[in-house]
């Protein structure tokens, strides 16, 4: 006869109670003093029992809590990446560019993936200014940007190598993940409070 998880837990619980009572009896503590100790033992054993019984659920909850706290992209078994909406209502993709951490604002209104010039310098992105810049219109007016490429751009489990980007002079203060990256995906969509990226 196979013992179920519930019966196994009951046996374990009973053994722990017997051990605790045996320890108290061996010390010959008066019952008036023993009652509080017995109560404390019951509470401890009950907590251990609950923790043991629901350990898988606790692991899942902890993983979700820590994931939400970090606001990092989650990649499931099929390779789909989910990015949580931040408190301001935007989707921020914590990514890696050339192996270094970068937080991108996902901007579906941006044609290209772009970096401020200072950030590009820190990331080792080589900008060729021998040609003519492109003039882009932004909320702060027209800005000049230059063509460049990054060796790798990773968002969750999705990687694009030798990827074309733009390096912008002037007012841009953050990296933008634009449509030229999103268009490499099979699909992207918003589901509730998450952006779903399907490679």
Image (cartoon, helix red, strand yellow):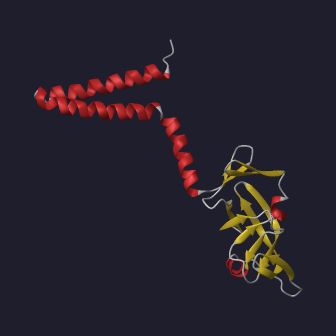
Image x and y of residue 52, in percent = 43, 33
Q: Position of residue 51 (x, y in %)?
A: 42, 35
x, y (%) of residue 108? Answer: 79, 62
Residue drawn at x 33%, y 22% as measured from the top left: 14
Q: Nearer the viewer, residue 64 or 148?
A: 64
User: Looking at the image, how many numbered discs can be counted on the residues?
Assistant: 0
Q: Decide which of 122, 39 is in the foreground and name it.
A: 39
Residue at x 84%, y 58% (from the top left corner):
184
Residue shown at the point (84%, 51%) measured from the top left: 186
Q: Is residue 172 visible?
A: yes
Outermost residue toward the right in this view: 131
> Where does residue 107 sit, x and y in percent of width and height?
76, 64
Above-or-below relation of 50 to 173 = above
Q: Residue furthest bottom?
A: 130
* Residue 198 at least partly seen: no
Q: Between 194 and 133, which is closer to the camera in this rendering?
A: 194
Rendering quarter of residue 148: bottom right
Q: Residue furthest top?
A: 1
Residue at image x 33%, y 24%?
A: 15
């Amino acid at each position: 006869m196979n013992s179920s998880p519930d019966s196994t837990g009951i046996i374990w619980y009973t053994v722990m109670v017997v051990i605790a009572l045996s320890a108290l009896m061996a010390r010959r503590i008066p019952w008036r003093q023993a009652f509080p100790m017995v109560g404390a033992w019951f509470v401890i054993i009950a907590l251990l029992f609950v923790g043991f019984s629901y350990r898988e659920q606790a692991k899942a909850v902890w993983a979700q809590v820590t994931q939400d706290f970090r606001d990092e992209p989650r990649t499931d078994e099929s390779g789909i990446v989910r990015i949580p909406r931040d408190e301001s209502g935007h989707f921020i993709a914590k990514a890696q560019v050339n192996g270094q951490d970068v937080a991108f604002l996902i901007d579906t209104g941006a044609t290209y993936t772009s970096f401020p010039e200072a950030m590009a310098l820190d990331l080792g992105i080589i900008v060729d200014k021998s040609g003519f810049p492109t003039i882009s219109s932004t909320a702060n007016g027209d800005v000049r940007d230059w063509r460049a490429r990054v060796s790798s751009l990773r968002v969750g489990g999705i990687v694009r190598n030798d990827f074309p980007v733009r390096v912008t002079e002037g007012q841009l203060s953050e990296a933008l993940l634009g449509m030229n990256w999103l268009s490499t995906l099979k699909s992207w969509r918003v589901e509730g409070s998450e952006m779903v990226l399907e490679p």
